[in-house]
Every structure is written in C-alpha cells, then in structure tokens.
Amino acid sequence: MKHQHRRSNILRSIITGICLLPAVSCAANMVIGTGDTTSYLVLESGNLGLRTYEIQYDSNSGPHDTKFLIDMAIAADTTLTATFFNYGTLADPNYFINAINGEAGSSSEPWTWWKQWVSGGSGYENPDYSFNSGEPTPGTWTSGYGISAPSRLIAAGSWDALVLSDGSVLPTVAPVPEPSSLLLASLAALGVFRRRRH
C-alpha cells in the first residue's frame, strides 16, 4: 500500500512539473495589448536573435491573422521594423515578410527567407505545399502558408513564428498549448492511472 501511495505522489509530481516547465521555459519577452485572448509571435534570426511576444487582444474584434500580430509587435516595440510583399490587392491582401529590421532573405544561393511556422489557430501548408484550412496541431510547429487571412487565422493560444533560414530550421521556442489543455490532459492521465490501480 505504501508503495502505491509513493508511486501516486511521484506521478503527481511529474505531471505538475510537465505542466509548469513549458510555461516557465517559454515565457514571452514582451507582453503587448489588452483583451480576453492571447496569441504568441516568435521572430528569430542570426542578427535579430530570439524575440517572443505575448499578444493580448479582444476575440470579438474580428478575425485576426499573423500580419495582425506583427503589426501589434511593431507598434509596441520601437526596436522592431518590418517590410512586406503584397501578392494580393489592397482590398484582398496576401502579405509575406520581405525583411525584419532590414534583414531579408538571400537573393542568391544558399537561399534563405523568413520561413513561417504555425501552431494552433487555422491554416497551414500540407506536405505537398498545398493549403490546408484546418487547425495545425497545438504544441507542434507546422509549416505556414502565408501571414494573411484566410491563409492564416490566429485563435486563443495559437503560436506564429518567422525564422530567417533555408526553410528547414524550426523556432528554438516550443509552442506551448494553452495551460487549460495541459491541465485537462494531466487530470485525465491521473484519472487513468488511478482507475488502473483500483
């Protein structure tokens, strides 16, 4: 009986640690805005370093995309600038990043560009490079398909990242699912463990 009680305490400690560790290791560098919803933006390159923004906004203020997150970051962070390509029209834009703080992709080999990665929300790139309007798996980086709606829509707890690379380099920050999801998963695991024990 003592052995089972000790094992249960160890399991609880592990689950608590798993829930708390990502939240601590992925804390945002800058908190921006106000509102009932939070999404995250990660910018990363050799010159820029790693910048993570926790962006709060009102979920009822309309659909938002990655460009919205970038614009919020630029408005709040005076050390950040960006230029964009618009492959759409003014009425129906289709934005892509040209440069961040003057740092653009290469115009000759080895090719580099601001590669987009997404987690949560909706809109991502399939392995065959086609558009998928579904939800990228929360907690995992997936290749993005563009920073404008409808190619990308953010949601509560979603993560968007832009990394200057050859397209194969993942962001060094892990996209942490919302704490409520982690808590529910932990409680479910504990319930299964307790049920097996009895």
Image (tube, rainbow, N blue to C red):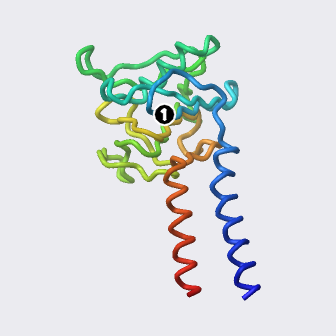
* Viewer-nearest residue: 173 or 22: 22
The crowding category of the residue bearing disc 1, from other C-alpha atoms within 10 Å (few below 14, some 14 to 19, many at least 20), is: many
Asked which quadrant contains residue 76, the reply is top right
Residue in view at x 66 percent, y 58 percent: 18
Give left or right: position of 126 versus 55. left
**52 or 127: nearer the viewer:** 52
Tell me residue 71's x, y (percent): 47, 18
Residue 189 position, x and y percent, is: 54, 70
The answer to whether residue 74 shows anywhere in this view is: yes
Q: Quadrant of the N terminus?
A: bottom right
Determine the residue positioned at 65% across, 43% down.
172
Q: Seen in the image, is 170 located left or right of residue 17?
A: left
The relative height of residue 92 versus residue 137 in the rendered view (above or below) is above
In the image, residue 48 lies at what x, y percent? 67, 25
**Please, what secondary structure does the residue beneath circle 1 have?**
strand
Closest to the observer: 131 or 159? 159
Q: Residue at x 44, y 18 (%)?
A: 84
The quarter of the picture where the C terminus appears is bottom right
Amino acid on which the number 1 mark rests in the picture? Thr
Q: Is residue 41 above or below residue 123?
A: above
Vertical side of 136 occupied by 47: above or below: above
Which residue carries the number 1 mark? 38
Is 48 rendered above or below residue 6? Answer: above
Q: Residue at x 71, y 78 (%)?
A: 7
The reply to whether residue 112 is in sight is no
Q: How many marks?
A: 1
